[in-house]
Amino acid sequence: MLASQFVFHLALQRDKVESFDRYPFNLPAIRSLDERLELHPKVTFFVGENGSGKSTLLEALAVSLGFNAEGGSRNFNFGTRASHSVLHEYLRVAKGVKRWRDGYFLRAESFFNVATEIERLDEGPGGASVISAYGGRSLHEQSHGESFLKLLNERFGGRGLYLLDEPEAALSPQRQLDALVRMHELVRQGSQFVMATHSPILMAYPDAWVYRFDADGIQRVAVHDTAHHRVMREFMADPRAVLDRLLP
């Protein structure tokens, strides 16, 4: 398994942490990282409520691997606001012997900044057009969902390492299914995904590992044991009963 993946585990260097009372080390999920967190060779999901630390850990993993904190490939080097945590400085990331051919860090909240940086780069002299790798049309001239699907279908390729932070934010349920299909194609071409998500649709990807982030730390669980899946299942089974309970 180790020879077939790009990143196989991460660990917190606890001896370097001066205090677990300050952010981000005071987050239960980060505080509980006393053993290495294994990653699936194909797809790993981080799930949990807002503020649970899943995006913070994904961001730290991305930065420690050389990706720009606001997103993009490892060739992107820009910053509109230094808002990322120092967690990457305290991670030990174990990489496989294989090197990824392509890589990308997507943050839904800062993808607008990535699109702006692409336009800035293409205004410069010489060199190949950056936007051509995204279908040739400005990402600002498309909806958020359209631009993400362009990224997935046009920019991503086989043997890639893709770190995605809440990609479902721009996608309808049908488009999430479309994204699953493309993700499966890329996995079959040797790619590895690590994703923070709230989407029960995406986290249903077969054989993926799901890590739940909550007040008890980080635990590997089955998808049907996540609150996201349970809430959606209960609502779809009897929406009237759920609404009556919530809106008496």
Image: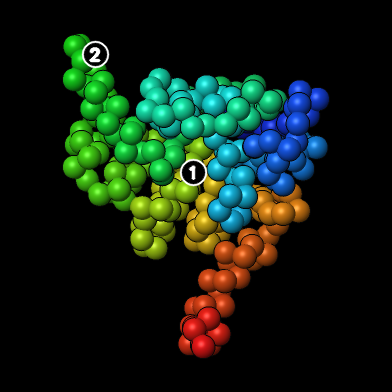
Q: In the image shown, does 22 or 156 lie closer to the viewer?
A: 22
Q: How crowded is mark 2: few (under 14 residues within 10 Å), some or many (20 or more)?
A: few
Q: Is residue 100 left or right of residue 8?
A: left
Q: Residues within 10 Å of mark 1 (few under 14, many from 20)?
A: many
Q: Which of marks 1 and 2 is in front?
A: 1
In this view of the protein, can residue 135 be seen by the observer? yes
Choose top left, top right, bottom left or bottom right for residue 34. Answer: top right
Q: Which residue is drawn at 45% across and 22% down?
A: 74
Q: Which residue is drawn at 32% across and 38% down?
A: 112
Residue at numbered disc 2 = 127
Image position of 110 with respect to 227: above or below: above
Q: Is residue 11 left or right of residue 237?
A: right
Image position of 242 with respect to 83: above or below: below
Give the x, y percent position of residue 248: 51, 88
Give the x, y percent position of residue 32: 77, 43
Q: In the image shown, does 70 or 125 lie closer to the viewer?
A: 70
Q: Which residue is drawn at 78% across and 29% down?
A: 14
Identify the mark at residue 129; answer none if there is no mark.
none
Residue at numbered disc 1 = 165
Q: Please, what is the three-letter code of the amino acid marked with disc 2?
A: Gly
Dot 1 or dot 2, earlier in sequence: 2
In this view of the protein, can residue 238 be seen by the observer? no
Give the x, y percent position of residue 1: 69, 35
